[in-house]
Structure formats: structure tokens, C-alpha cells
């Protein structure tokens, strides 16, 4: 796995879906989402450089990834 940063929303969503398969992303608080992203293997972004807009984009991408996997 390569390095990822805050701008890699699709890859972050993919990895979150793997790491937290049992979690419904719509229920995740942004504080928890932030912590989980920072803990992902290969994450090299600055933890202080995220905001609500970035976390919302990640959450939406995670929801989409989860729905795609459910359809397969």
C-alpha cells in the first residue's frame, strides 16, 4: 500500500471500509473518523490539516464504497 494524504478520499474510503467493515459510516462522528484516518497504514498527512469539509468528503466516499461492495 502506498502513502495517502487527506486529498486521497477514495483510497481512504477504501481502506476504512476494509478496516471497519462492521461500521455504518453514516453513524461515525467526525472526531472518530479523524482518528481512524490518521491511524490508517500509509497515512502521511498532517493530522492538523483536516477540517469538516474534508472529513465529510471522506465519509461520503466511504458510504459509496460500502454501498458498492454491498451490491457485489
Image: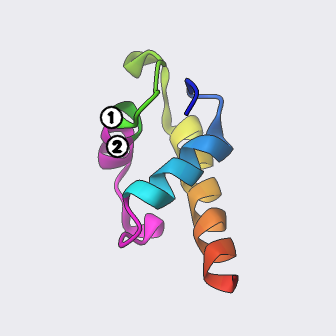
Q: Nearer the viewer, residue 1 or 47?
A: 1
Q: Which residue is mark 1?
A: 39
Above or below, comparing residue 32 to residue 72 in the picture: above
Name the residue: 48% across, 19% down: 45
Residue 70 pos. (x, y %)? 61, 82
Q: Is residue 16 left or right of residue 20?
A: right
Residue occupying the far front of the picture: 1
Q: Nearer the viewer, residue 33 or 67?
A: 67
Mark 2 is surrounded, within 10 Å at the Cα level, by few (under 14), some (14 to 19) or many (20 or more) other residues, namely some
Secondary-structure class at tag 1: helix
Residue 33 pos. (x, y %)? 38, 47
Q: Which residue is mark 2?
A: 36
Q: Are marks 2 and 1 in contact (CB under 8 Å)?
A: yes
Residue 6 pos. (x, y %)? 56, 28
Distance in Å between CA atoms under marks 2 and 1: 5 Å
Q: Is 21 contained in the magenta span?
A: yes
Name the residue: 50% across, 38% down: 52
The N terminus is located in which quarter?
top right
Disc tally is: 2
Query: Which stretch did the figure color magenta?
Result: 20-36
Above or below, comparing residue 67 to residue 44 in the picture: below
Above or below, comparing residue 63 to residue 39 in the picture: below
Secondary-structure class at tag 2: helix
> Which of the 4 image quarters holds residue 62?
bottom right
Name the residue: 38% across, 68% down: 27
Amino acid at each position: 500500500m502506498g502513502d495517502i494524504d487527506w486529498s486521497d478520499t477514495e483510497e481512504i474510503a477504501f481502506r476504512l471500509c476494509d478496516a471497519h467493515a462492521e461500521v455504518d459510516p453514516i453513524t461515525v462522528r467526525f472526531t472518530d473518523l479523524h482518528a481512524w484516518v490518521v491511524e490508517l497504514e500509509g497515512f502521511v498527512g498532517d493530522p492538523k490539516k483536516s477540517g469538516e469539509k474534508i472529513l465529510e468528503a471522506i465519509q461520503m466516499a466511504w458510504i459509496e464504497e460500502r454501498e458498492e461492495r454491498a451490491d457485489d
